[in-house]
């Protein structure tokens, strides 16, 4: 029994290691909602896209503003001899360029729609940040569940080893059985150590995703892959136009169409008006100067711009239609994956896991009573482990698919 006591000490060391991983967490707990709030304020890409959106909105505001007027001052007819200042005509006035044909409104519409596209990009970036947090959070829950399951296996293999050692001392079991039980226990120790490493890596990834240090990461709390009703596909498809991906594509397509209108308006010549006050030299009195200025469209410099704008509009329109087709395909794909994942988790929860627990419990009981060989128990335990891992993997897949759907809808 000295060996069993040593093995029990090893189990205590493993448990202490897991406790150390848990204790390394910061104070308090961290739910998924809290993690999403932290990510929304700490991720630098969100700050960058907010700045880009602010700049786009400011450009749209400026495009709707009038052009600044010009103030001019001229000295005319200054004599080369005598009093040049008093002998000259001096003119001071204002000149304003007017955009005719709705050019200012077309420019403003194009910039406003482009800002809407940037706003959609901001929302999409936010969803992608949330996706990275959801997936990292789910992996922490998954690896922690694996560690807990592996700890149960260690405890179970230790119990089996003690039973075999006792039966060997009583002459009811061969040394080979003790060796096999010892090997199973060693494998269980290796597996729980690997699971602890995976948990540490998952916590590090989550901390990095949140933009915080590992020592500051609180204890993660939540339920991995909790079953829920699958949303109706038709409802999801009906709402795809409100997704950031399509809002951005549609806004950019509409912006390019507005650029075509703007380029068409820019072919209309500039029109300027001026009003000035003229003071004649040598006390000749004052007069008012008024005039207009019209650009002569002798060279069609706006034609190339209009042609390019039309080509860009056709490209963006095709991109928007392609994006909608792709969005619908991805929604259908993710919905199908979600339905399968939900069904698998429910099957494990309602049927497979209870059956596996009952079978393993019966095998352990028979082995403890001496009615079953160790090899039979090991077969049932291996099947139980595989079923537990399959359930945890299915729950992780369910959370990952849900995260994918959150980005799309």
Image (cartoon, grey):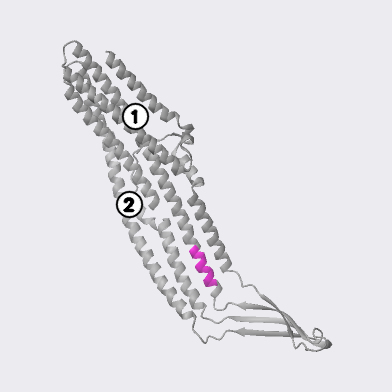
Question: In the image shown, does 275 or 282 lie closer to the viewer?
Answer: 282
Task: From the image, tell me which residue sits under label 1.
Answer: 148
In this view, 234 is above or below 302: above
In this view, 376 is above or below 262: above
- Tell me: 35 left or right of 329: right
Q: Residues within 10 Å of mark 2 (few under 14, many from 20)?
A: few
Task: From the image, tell me which residue sits under label 2.
Answer: 233
Q: Is residue 389 visible?
A: yes
Tell me which residue sits at (30%, 15%) in the image: 5
| Residue 260: x %, y % from top left | 46, 74
Occupied quadrant, residue 149: top left
Secondary element at tag 2: helix
Q: Which mark is residue 202?
A: none
Tell me which residue sits at (29%, 31%) in the image: 191
Q: Which residues are magenta?
A: 105-114
| Residue 385: x %, y % from top left | 25, 31
Q: Residues within 10 Å of mark 1 (few under 14, many from 20)?
A: some
Residue positioned most to the front: 81
Q: Is residue 355 visible?
A: no
| Residue 161: x %, y % from top left | 24, 19
Question: In the image shown, does 101 or 92 lie closer to the viewer?
Answer: 92
């Amino acid at each position: 029994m000295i060996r069993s006591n040593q093995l029990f000490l090893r189990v205590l060391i493993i448990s202490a290691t897991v406790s150390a991983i848990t204790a390394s967490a910061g104070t308090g707990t961290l739910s998924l909602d809290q993690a999403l709030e932290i990510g929304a304020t700490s991720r630098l890409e969100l700050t960058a896209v907010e700045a880009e959106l602010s700049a786009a909105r400011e450009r749209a505001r400026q495009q709707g503003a009038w052009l600044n007027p010009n103030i001019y001052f001229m000295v005319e007819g200054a004599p080369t001899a005598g009093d040049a200042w008093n002998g000259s005509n001096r003119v001071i006035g204002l000149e304003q360029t007017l955009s005719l044909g709705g050019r200012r409104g077309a420019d403003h519409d194009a910039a406003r729609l482009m800002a809407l596209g940037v706003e959609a990009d901001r929302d999409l970036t936010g969803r992608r940040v949330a996706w990275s947090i959801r997936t990292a959070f789910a992996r922490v829950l998954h690896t922690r569940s694996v560690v807990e399951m592996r700890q149960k296996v260690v405890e179970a293999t230790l119990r089996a080893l003690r039973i075999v050692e006792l039966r060997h001392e009583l002459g009811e079991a061969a040394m080979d059985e003790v060796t096999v039980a010892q090997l199973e226990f060693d494998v269980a120790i290796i597996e729980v150590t690997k699971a602890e490493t995976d948990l540490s890596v998952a916590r590090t990834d989550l901390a990095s995703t949140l933009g915080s240090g590992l020592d500051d990461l609180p204890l993660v709390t939540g339920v991995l892959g909790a079953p829920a009703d699958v949303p109706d596909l038709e409802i999801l498809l009906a709402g795809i136009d409100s997704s950031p991906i399509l809002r951005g594509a549609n806004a950019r397509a509409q912006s390019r169409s507005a650029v075509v209108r703007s380029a068409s308006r820019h072919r209309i010549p500039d029109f300027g008006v001026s009003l000035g006050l003229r003071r004649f030299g040598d006390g000749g009195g004052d007069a008012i100067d008024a005039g207009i200025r019209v650009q002569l469209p002798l060279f069609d410099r706006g034609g190339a711009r209009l042609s390019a704008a039309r080509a860009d509009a056709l490209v963006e329109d095709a991109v928007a239609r392609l994006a909608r087709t792709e969005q619908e395909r991805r929604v259908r794909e993710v919905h199908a994956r979600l339905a399968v994942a939900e069904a698998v988790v429910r099957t494990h929860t309602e049927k497979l896991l209870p059956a596996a627990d009952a079978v393993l419990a019966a095998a352990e009981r028979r082995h403890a009573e001496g009615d079953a060989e160790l090899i039979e128990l090991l077969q049932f335990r291996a099947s139980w482990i595989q079923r537990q891992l399959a359930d945890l993997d299915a729950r992780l897949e369910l959370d990952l698919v849900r995260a994918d759907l959150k980005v799309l809808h």
